Image (tube, rainbow, N blue to C red):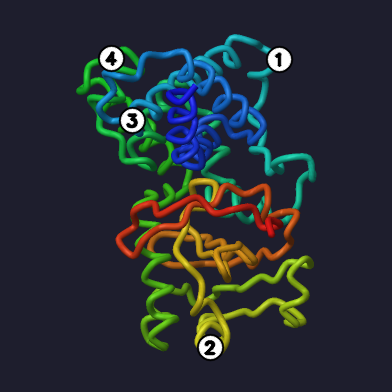
Amino acid sequence: MAEQDWLSERFAEHQGRLRALAYRMLGSSGEAEDAVQDAWLRVSRADVEQVDNFGGWLTTVVARVCLNMLETRRSRPEDSAGIQPPEQSARGGHGAGPEDEMLLADSVGAALMVVLGTLAPAERLAFVLHDVFDVPFDQIAMIIDRTPAAARQIASRARRRVIAAGVEPEPDLPRRQKIVAAFLAASRSGDFGALLELLAPEAILRFYPTAQEISIPSDIRGADEVAGFFLARGAQAARLALVDGIPAAVWAPAGRPRAVFAFAISGDKITSIGLVADPDQLQDLDIVFLSSRGAPVRKAPAATDR
């Protein structure tokens, strides 16, 4: 029992990242959740004593589950007829909402997800794992049963198709994390110029209906106005975190999440920031606080915990 508890805790540490990976692979939050649960069943029955890189091994397990699901989907004509936009569906039992769209669709890029849906399973896996999650080609090769050179060629072919469709590949997660961390640092230090450098000229700060207690009547538009807000009353007390595996900022007085700032990024610029403050939405999010160096510190308790 003690070993199973240890394994469960280790799996939970990586669950947000695994869910983010599965969502990019499958384009459906429901299927992504199924893939992660399937992976847990496999992990819980495996012998992990010889596993040196636990996070890398979990990535491989989830990737293989997703690859099987994609190949099964591709073999069914009813699922392959036509390319549909990705789900912008919710988590838990609350139904789809704007908060979920911000945390999933905006940060992933709906246009990119549609293009990924046109790729063959191996192409999609190689592109997502390498270009988004920085997984080395030798590891990708083992998952798709190819040589590292072939895996590199497959990812390159997928990348060319993404670019040819006029869609800019999303920044990899480590770079996204650096951008969010730099934004928080500039906000705390009062560096208006640094904030402007990080914000797109047309940047928008969205306040969802559940954040009305912040007493902001409407969205804030334009880099100058958004930067001014964060200097005056923004995220100085917010902490860098992974929210469902996506770099974000979390305001958590006494360690309890009370608000999430979700960032949409294009290239090296922040195009929009969404403020989510509804406890019902927050409690469904997987939040892991990060240190200033980007290392996981601890998993956040539920927003409604007292």
Q: CA distance from mark 3 to mark 2?
A: 43 Å
Residue at 58%, 25% in the rendered image: 37
Q: Which residue is mark 4?
A: 146
User: Which badge, 3 or 2, is on the more N-terminal residue?
Assistant: 3
Corner quadrant of residue 99: bottom right
The residue under label 2 is 228
Label 4 environment density (alpha carbons within 10 Å; few <14, some 14–19, many ≥20):
some
Q: Is residue 252 left or right of residue 10?
A: right
Element type at marker 4? loop
Disc 1 versus disc 2: nearer the observer: 2
Tag 4: amino acid: Arg
- Residue 54 circle label: 3
Give the mark nearest the N terminus, 4 or 2. 4
> In the rendering, at what x and y percent does residue 113 appear?
55, 40
How many residues crowd mark 1 within 10 Å: few (<14), some (14–19), many (20+)? few
Residue type marked 3: Phe
* Residue 194, placed above or below residue 46: below
Label 3 crowd (10 A; few <14 / some 14-19 / many >=20): some
Number of marks drawn: 4
